[in-house]
Image (cartoon, rainbow, N blue to C red):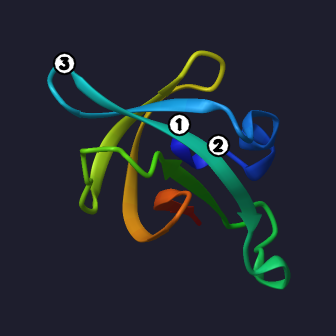
């Protein structure tokens, strides 16, 4: 199912909240901060264009996620097991990225 997702599937949900389930009964609330298409000239015919999504956790979040496959849920997008990686933080929060290729 993940192989069918495209950047267009996530674009309508920019700035909306997603749940990252990191252990049984516990989740971290994140916001979809950015959707970026990658390597526009390298798409193979019949294959989707690679893209990334960037989630932002609140600056006061007490949970720090490490790179791992997490169950990520949104009421309209659905629930997917996605590999996310922490990529930094600033005054707005901690950022996590997933790349689809």
Q: Nearer the viewer, mark 3 or mark 2?
A: 3
Callout 1: few (<14), some (14-19), or many (20+) C-alpha neighbours within 10 Å? few
The mark that comes first in sequence, 1 or 3, is 1
Image point (81%, 69%), residue name? 45
Image point (46%, 47%), residue name? 57
Residue projecting furthest to the left: 24
Disc marking residue 1: 1
Callout 2: few (<14), some (14-19), or many (20+) C-alpha neighbours within 10 Å? few
| Residue 63, horizontal then vertical, whole percent | 24, 45
Element under label 2? helix
Q: In front here: 37 or 15?
A: 15
| Residue 89, horizontal then vertical, whole percent | 45, 68
Q: Measure the alpha-carbon separation of dots 1 and 2.
A: 6 Å
Q: Which of the 4 quarters of the picture holds residue 27?
A: top left
Image point (74%, 64%), residue name? 36
Q: Which residue is mark 3?
A: 25
Element under label 3? loop
Q: Which residue is mark 2?
A: 4
Which quadrant is the C terminus positioned in? bottom right
Q: Please tell me whether residue 63 is drawn above or below residue 39 in the rendered image.
A: above
Q: Please tell me whether residue 20 is drawn above or below residue 79 in the rendered image.
A: below
Q: Please tell me whether residue 36 is drawn above or below residue 73 in the rendered image.
A: below
Q: Nearer the viewer, mark 1 or mark 3?
A: 3
Give the side of residue 63 with respect to residue 20, left or right: left
| Residue 31, horizontal then vertical, whole percent | 58, 41
Q: In front here: 56 or 37?
A: 56
Q: Is residue 35 visible?
A: yes
Q: Measure the alpha-carbon separation of dots 3 and 2.
A: 28 Å
1 and 2 marks in contact (CB < 8 Å):
yes
Image point (70%, 56%), residue name? 34
């Amino acid at each position: 199912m993940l192989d069918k997702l495209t950047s267009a599937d996530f674009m309508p949900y920019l700035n909306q909240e997603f749940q990252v389930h990191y252990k049984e009964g516990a989740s971290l609330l994140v916001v979809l901060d950015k959707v970026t298409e990658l390597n526009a000239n390298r798409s193979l015919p019949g294959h989707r264009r690679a893209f990334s999504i960037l989630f932002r956790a609140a600056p006061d979040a007490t949970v720090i996620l490490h790179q791992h496959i997490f169950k990520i849920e949104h009421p309209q997008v659905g629930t997917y097991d996605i590999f996310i990686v922490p990529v930094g933080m600033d005054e707005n929060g901690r950022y996590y990225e997933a790349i689809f290729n």
